[in-house]
Image (cartoon, rainbow, N blue to C red):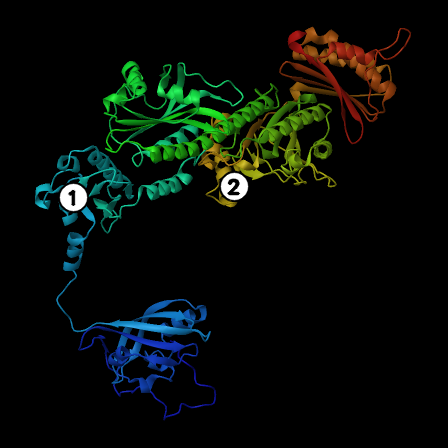
């Protein structure tokens, strides 16, 4: 109800209706009528004018309709003395603006001047006129009657048509209503203090008690499909029951209430339809074959059968393969479900092996591909249960009828499902067999899809593992630890990868990449790109040049690939990559990235920060350059490279995730393997939705005692001097045994630099672990090529000699000049 403002410059008309204004402000009074209770109603149009005034409203506020209808409703509001519109008026304005139902308390003025604080409920409605009006209602109590606060809950409990009983934390009965007394034909006094299995010894009593205990432990309501009905325990025709934990004001569970809800009996056809509708979303909820088989068993028990066993073939029979014979077959019991808590020992549990003898019902169902319904008098069933120890449970339980349904999907035979009845008195009929077939078909499709998905996932995982490094190479520059976690979703394994590539001069390249998409295509593309990176790294390209060549490769792959594959990202478009080169001599790390997250650095003082690497576009877009950045890392720094799956968490925003990452990296750890574990356990609370590759490296340094360098004049006479420098240095390092080979290598490299290169010329020897590297730099960009010299050629034998003496050799280009290097393996010298 809205208080209408007086237009500017106008005074209220004294002849208009206004509530009386007594001299002294009366106290608020309770709104009660001398007669019986009633409801006061009023209708207010969108202008705030009263258009309807009921008799209950007249009795409540004292105004006849003639004095109220046509007047602003806001004038019924009492002035609270604050000089402003009441809070209730403001709420009403907001409700009216939004056309929403409103409820609240407002202070109204009675015709005799009394102030009444009333609880009102207002509903918006739109009549045929199209304008919005409000129906305001208020329930008004009559004279006080006998107290009902305590009697009503008691009457509700005892007289409810539902079965209700309350059990304490020891699961002993505390209260029972008349429905419970009638169901068990015992009075509350007889049952009080007893547990349900003591009151009514029955398998359903024990099952119900287990669910009550779970309700007490978890504080969550538990449900049963069928439990009690007015004739006692009956699973087939019982009422669905809920077991609700009862808590005190502090939230502590004090008891559990059993309530069995009445429902009218439905026709068998409708019950079957409802069961199929319910199971359409319950069967096959995951890609887990065992779970799907169990969901089939749970759907059929107890509403269709008393016991269900699902057995699957180890190798499904394809439609193109020969049909299975009725001979002896071996299956894997995948799921079992029974109405009773205990089962005979002869009933093989889930996970066990079941062997079906020739001409047994399961063997016949698989061979013929048809379902079958049996009575215990059937000779085939009688012979099977008598001769096969694994089928003895059927007779031991007192089974009177059985159904065997082959599990088939898309021409593939997967196994069998066995349905039996021993508690339900009605034997299986044709309608039951049709229902069992439809349930089994639902499960068969899900199992078939799950097998195919699992097979594809296994193939992808095998391919992925074969393409990822099986062991990290030995090198002196970095201590390395790594982790790879495949995605846990149905999308399958992705194309994340990492690599560690030893380079010349004791340097090491670190690579982390993420191919768009999932499955075999993504893994195959990952293998292509990883091989390309290794090839380009072997040429000693700088990080930005390597990514440029990799970008061109992805563009070519996408052009050669078909449209569907390219749309899935299988050609690599959108792939991200980070390439870093660490030099232990200078302790410099040179990096470039293509759309990949930046690496994190942990200093020896445990400070954590991201390296500022220009992002660059993802691979395959083309046209945009990649930039490098160079950072000097103190010895003992930790470098963390990862794919974006590590940061994509469901329950945290990115800022919180980054804080967790920094905390995990800064946490002291005895080894890098522990650092990897800290990162994954801190950031992951579930199976990742995307693949995760994590590479952790701790920097080492080659100090001056392992590196020797000399500047050489561009004169042939310095070749002998270079050999002496090398021989003297090897003697200082205790490597005299390698002096002869090293002299030959140094002599050839220096001679080539003087003859074909440009000054300045530098010679450098690096000794790291079991490797000796000889490097010669000159400022010419002309690279030498290995060739076979003819008989009378005077040149062309130098590099051939170096290639024969060295473990490997190559050329490393710089912005100005080049370095020719050769590595010797000291263990074979």
10 Å neighbourhood of mark 1: few (<14), some, or many (≥20)? some
Position of 583 with respect to 89 (left or right) is right
Viewer-proximal residue among 757 and 682: 682
Q: Residues under labels 1 and 2: Cα distance?
A: 60 Å
Residue 721 seen in render = no
Which residue is under mark 2?
Answer: 658
Viewer-proximal residue among 387 and 679: 387
N-terminal of the pair, mark 1 or mark 2, is 1
Give the secondary structure at mark 1: helix
Residue 363 seen in render = yes
Give the secondary structure at mark 2: helix
Q: Position of residue 260 (x, y in %)?
A: 23, 45
Viewer-proximal residue among 296 and 637: 296
Q: Quadrant of the C terminus?
A: top right
Residue 747 against residue 405 in the figure, above or below:
above
Residue 51 against residue 679 in the figure, above or below:
below
Q: Position of residue 125 (x, y in %)?
A: 40, 70
Q: Quadrant of the N terminus?
A: bottom left
Which residue is under mark 1?
Answer: 183
Viewer-proximal residue among 570 and 670: 570
10 Å neighbourhood of mark 2: few (<14), some, or many (≥20)? some
Q: Locate residue 572: give its quadrant.
A: top right
Position of 787 with respect to 124 (left or right) is right
Q: Position of residue 717 (x, y in %)?
A: 86, 14
Furthest-right residue in view? 792
Furthest-left residue in view? 189
Furthest-bottom residue in view? 15
The structure residue drawn at horizontal position 21% and vertical position 49%, both measured from the top left corner, is 162
Q: Locate residue 538: give its quadrant.
A: top right
Q: Position of residue 454 (x, y in %)?
A: 50, 27
Position of 114 with respect to 484 (left or right) is left
């Amino acid at each position: 109800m809205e208080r209408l403002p007086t237009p500017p410059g106008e005074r209220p008309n004294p002849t208009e209706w206004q509530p009386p204004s007594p001299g002294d402000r009366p106290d608020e009074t309770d709104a009660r009528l001398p007669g019986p209770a009633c409801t006061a109603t009023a209708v207010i149009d969108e202008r705030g004018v009263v258009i309807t005034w009921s008799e209950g409203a007249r009795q409540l506020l004292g105004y006849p309709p003639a004095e109220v209808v046509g007047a602003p409703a806001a004038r019924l509001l009492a002035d609270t003395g604050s000089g402003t519109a009441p809070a209730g008026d403001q709420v009403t304005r907001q409700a009216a603006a939004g056309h929403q139902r409103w409820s609240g308390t407002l202070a109204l003025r009675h015709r005799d001047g009394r102030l009444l604080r009333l609880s009102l409920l207002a509903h918006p409605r739109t009549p045929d006129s199209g304008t919005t009006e409000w129906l305001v209602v208020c329930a008004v109590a009559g004279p006080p009657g006998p107290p009902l606060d305590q009697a009503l809950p008691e009457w509700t409990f005892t007289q409810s048509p539902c079965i209700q009983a309350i059990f304490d934390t020891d699961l002993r009965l505390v209260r029972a209503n008349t429905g419970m007394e009638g169901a068990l034909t015992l009075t509350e006094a007889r049952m009080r203090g007893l547990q349900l299995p003591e009151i009514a010894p029955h398998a359903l009593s024990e099952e119900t008690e287990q669910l009550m205990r779970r309700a007490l432990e978890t504080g969550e309501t538990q449900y049963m499909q069928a439990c009690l009905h007015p004739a006692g325990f009956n699973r087939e025709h019982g009422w669905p029951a809920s077991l609700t934990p009862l808590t005190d004001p502090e939230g502590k569970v004090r008891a559990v209430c059993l309530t069995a809800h009445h429902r009218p009996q439905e026709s068998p056809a409708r019950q079957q339809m409802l069961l199929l509708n319910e199971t359409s979303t319950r069967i096959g909820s995951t890609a887990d074959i065992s779970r799907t088989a169990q969901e089939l068993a749970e759907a059929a028990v107890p509403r269709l059968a008393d016991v269900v066993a699902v057995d699957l073939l180890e190798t499904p029979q394809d439609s193109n393969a020969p049909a299975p014979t009725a001979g002896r077959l071996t299956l894997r019991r995948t799921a079992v479900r029974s109405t009773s808590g205990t089962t005979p020992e002869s009933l093989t549990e889930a996970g066990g092996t079941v062997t079906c003898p020739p001409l047994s019902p399961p063997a016949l169902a698989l061979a013929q591909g048809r379902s079958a319904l049996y009575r215990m008098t059937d000779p085939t069933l009688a012979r099977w249960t008598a001769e096969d120890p694994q089928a003895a449970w059927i007779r031991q339980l007192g089974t009177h009828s059985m159904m065997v349904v082959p599990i088939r999907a898309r021409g593939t035979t997967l196994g069998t499902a066995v349905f039996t009845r021993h508690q339900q008195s009605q034997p299986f009929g044709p309608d039951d067999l049709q229902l069992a077939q439809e349930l089994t078909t639902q499960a068969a499709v899900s199992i078939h899809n799950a097998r195919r998905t699992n097979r594809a996932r296994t193939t992808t995982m095998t391919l992925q593992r074969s393409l990822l490094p099986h062991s990290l190479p030995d090198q002196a520059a970095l201590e390395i630890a790594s982790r790879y976690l495949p995605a846990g979703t149905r999308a399958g394994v992705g194309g994340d990868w990492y690599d560690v590539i030893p380079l010349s001069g004791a340097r090491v390249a670190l690579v982390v990449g993420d191919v768009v998409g999932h499955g075999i295509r993504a893994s195959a593309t990952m293998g292509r790109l990883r091989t390309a990176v290794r090839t380009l790294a072997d040429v000693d390209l700088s990080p930005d040049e390597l990514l440029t060549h990799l970008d061109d490769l992805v563009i070519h792959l996408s052009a050669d690939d078909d449209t569907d594959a390219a749309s899935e990202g299988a050609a690599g478009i959108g792939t991200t990559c980070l390439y870093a080169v660490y030099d232990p001599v200078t302790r410099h790390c040179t990096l470039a990235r293509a759309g990949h997250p930046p690496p994190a650095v942990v200093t020896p003082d445990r400070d954590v920060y991201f390296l500022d690497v220009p992002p660059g576009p993802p691979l395959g877009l083309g046209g945009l350059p990649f930039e490098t950045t160079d950072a000097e890392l103190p010895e003992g720094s930790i470098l963390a490279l990862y794919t974006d799956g590590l940061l994509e968490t469901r329950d945290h925003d990115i800022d919180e995730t980054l804080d967790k990452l920094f905390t995990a990296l800064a946490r002291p750890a005895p080894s890098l393997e522990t650092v990897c574990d800290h990162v994954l356990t801190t950031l992951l609370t579930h199976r990742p939705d995307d693949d995760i590759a994590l590479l952790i490296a701790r920097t080492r340094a080659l100090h001056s005692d392992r590196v020797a360098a000399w500047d050489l004049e561009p004169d042939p006479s310095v070749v002998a001097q270079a050999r002496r420098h090398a021989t003297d240095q090897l003697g200082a390092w205790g490597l005299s045994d390698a002096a002869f080979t090293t002299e030959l290598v140094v002599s050839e490299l220096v001679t080539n630099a003087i003859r074909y290169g440009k000054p300045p010329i530098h010679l450098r020897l690096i000794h790291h672990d079991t490797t000796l590297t000889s490097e010669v730099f000159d400022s010419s960009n002309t690279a030498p090529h290995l060739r076979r010299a003819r008989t009378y050629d005077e040149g062309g034998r130098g590099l051939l000699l170096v290639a024969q003496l060295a473990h490997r050799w190559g050329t490393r280009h710089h912005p100005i000049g080049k370095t020719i290097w050769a590595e010797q393996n000291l263990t074979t010298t």
